[in-house]
Image (cartoon, rainbow, N blue to C red):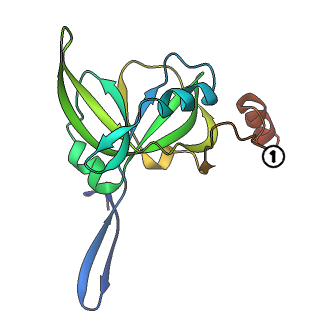
Amino acid sequence: MELYPHVMRVGMVYGSYYIELMAIHMIKLIVGAETLEDYARWQSQEVFDYHGQPAVPCWTRFQAKRADEIVRSGGSLYRVLKSRIQCRSRILGFEMVELEGQGKKCMILQDPEIITTVSAPHRPFQGWRYFDEAKAPEDRGVYVLGQETDAPPPEMEEELRAAGLV
C-alpha cells in the first residue's frame, strides 16, 4: 500500500469493502516533571469536562494540520520524560484558544487515563512531532497514581532488553 501509507488493511465483509486506517499519533516532551508520578499528579489536577467526558489539556503553539485524522484514527499523544518515551494518552480533540496576553494557543485534549509504555530512548526536540505507529513502543498498562510498579527503572530495562533478558 505504498500509495496510501495510512491504510493498514483493506478487506471485504458481506460484499462491502472496508478500509482500516493506521492511527496517527503525536509525540511531545514532558517539561517540569521529574518522574511519571509527578506527571500523573500534575495531570490529575488539570482534568475538566470536554463535551461530556473528562479531559486534560496539553498546550502548544500550533495545531496539527492532520488534527481531524488524528482524532478519527484514535491517535495518542506519546510523552517523552527524561529522554525516554514512557507513556501515552488518547487524543480526544483539538481546540484553538485565545489566551489573554499570550495570543492563540492550541489545546490538545487528552484522555486523563495515562497508559505506560515500554521505555524507549528518544532525543529531545522542541514542540511536537507526528509519531509513526511503527516506532511506537508497546503498551504496559494503565498507570495508577501511587501504585507500585514491578517494572525496572527505564535505564535498567533497556540494558536488560539489550542482554535479551526481557
Q: Which residue is mark 1?
A: 164
Q: Is residue 19 above or below residue 81?
A: below
- Please say if 60 is above or below 149: above
Amino acid of disc 1: Gly
Q: To which quarter of the image does residue 56 belong?
A: top left
Q: Is residue 22 left or right of residue 88?
A: left
Q: Residue furthest bottom?
A: 14
Q: Residue at x 24, y 35 (%)?
A: 64
Q: Is residue 115 above or below residue 107?
A: below
> Residue drawn at (23%, 85%), measured in percent from left and top?
16
Q: Residues within 10 Å of mark 1 (few under 14, many from 20)?
A: few
Q: Nearer the viewer, residue 132 or 112?
A: 112
Q: Nearer the viewer, residue 50 or 69?
A: 50
Residue 118 percent location from the top left of the image = 64, 43
Picture quarter containing residue 11? bottom left
Q: Nearer the viewer, residue 105 or 16?
A: 105
Residue 83: x and y in percent read: 58, 23
Relative image position of residue 69 (x, y in whole percent) = 24, 50
Q: Quadrant of residue 160?
A: top right
Secondary structure of the residue carrying numbered label 1 = loop
